[in-house]
Image (spheres, rainbow, N blue to C red):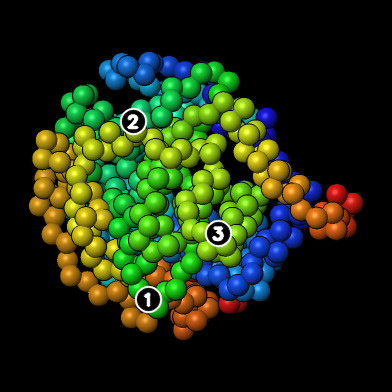
Amino acid sequence: MRVEQVEGSPDDFTSEQLATVNMDGISRKVRLDVVDRWPEVGDYVIVHAGFAIHSLVEEEAKRNIELIRELASHMPEELLRSDNGS
Amino acid sequence: MRHVDEYRDQALIEPLIAELHRSVQKPVRLMEVCGTHTMAIFRSGIRSILPAGMEIVSGPGCPVCVTSAAHMDAFIDLADRDAVRLAIFGDLFRVPGSRGSLAHASSRGAKIDVVYSSMDALDIARNHPDDLVVFLGVGFETTTPGIAATILAAHRQRIDNFCVFSTHKVIPGPLDVLMQDPELRINGLLCPGHVSAIIGAGAYQPFVDRYRLACVVAGFEPADLLNGLIRLARQIAQDRPAVDNIYTRVVSWEGNRRARELVDTVFEPADMEWRGLGPIPGSGLKIKQAYHHYDAEQRLEIVIPDVPEAKGCICGQILKGQTTPPRCPLFGKRCTPAHPIGPCMVSSEGTCAAFFKYGADT
């Protein structure tokens, strides 16, 4: 879920620690009490039961898919051929 | 960015399937620990394209499924008390105890609110000052930090008519029990994604050291799952067990320290009863004495009854990876998602529900 707005601060537990996040056009508020890294607008968060448990930037997300592509590309040519020509 | 689309790209998936078939060089028996993995493997169709020689069994990673019938009965007793209002996660609503479910209690007038987040229970407490709002704490390491934060928020905001009935559980304990079972013969673990976000990939190193178990932390998209299975098969083929974290976009080696500190502030280890597995020392979490005002068990003097599991139900064996749902005589006959007998059929992450929904027959 992409972060659109952040309320509160990581050091002030007396204020509400909230983020407004968007997924597929739907906005909702999530708590930031337990998140591992305080997110900024534009970052992404993994949410469980209304709490963000992890925040990441887009580059981190892309790095994972690159590693999987690397795994897929290290195979013999005949295995890479498929019905759709990929 | 819809980043998930890339993990479902057919051009990426097909070579991964081919590589998975190449990687299995001897029979491998894997356990996926997490209920969300159970459903993701079915939903993506991966179970149907597994290579010959690769078997996947489900473990005890659905929190609703491992909530004992005794705890369910205690929840229902609580719901029937005057001036008590329960706040629960929705998947608990229809789980059977020995005599009905919370749904039955609700139909006879018990006050039960289904909430999305434990923080919602605080709003309910503010809006119902004459009731004691009891949040039923059911979940693993992913859920507990939020509950700890909620108790601390209640403490800060001086909300007195709120408490938590904690049956929270931690994952490594039961895994340790299962891996000591010589009949289980597990070669590798597909480690849970979001539990690992909290405890860190390093939490599985003892399983490598103690049992020479291949361990891979993976995400939930088809490419994540195939990558995880390939790496498990390779580790086993090469006889080089290790912890391999391929979900680095969410999971670090150390995990979420902030979340764990919150949990350590509010909770301490306790013995816990697991449905199907029995009592496991230190595998649960109870509220520390410093926050006893928020401990429903103390505040309401709750007694956990001695309750047998449902007759004929083999959810216990399924949670231990000893058998599969279609081998249960109740499966699809007396036990269906509409009329569940056991918890594995109730929960959206339960193994029986997954087999029923996707029509698997082995």
Give B302 or A9, whichever is nearer the viewer: A9
Mark 2 on the same chain as mark 3: yes
**Secondary-structure class at tag 2:** helix
Give B145 or B350, whichever is nearer the viewer: B145
Amino acid on which the number 1 mark rests in the picture: Pro
2 or 3: mark nearer the eye: 3
Amino acid on which the number 3 mark rests in the picture: Gln
**Secondary-structure class at tag 3:** helix
Q: Report the residue at 13% width, 55% height from top.
A: B302
Residue receiving disc 1 = B182
3 or 1: mark nearer the eye: 3
Residue receiving disc 2 = B258
Give the class, few, some or many, for how many residues have Cα within 10 Å of label 3's Cα (few <14, many ≥20).
many
Instruction: Report whether residue B45 is seen.
Output: no
**Disc 3 to disc 1: CB gap under 8 Å:** no
Does B298 appear above or below B45? above
Q: Earlier in the sequence, mark 1 or mark 2?
A: 1
Amino acid on which the number 2 mark rests in the picture: Arg
Answer left or right for B58 relative to B265: right
Cα distance between the residues tagged 1 and 2: 37 Å
Residue receiving disc 3 = B235
Question: Disc 2: which chain?
Answer: B
Q: Report the residue at 48% width, 40% height from top.
A: B251
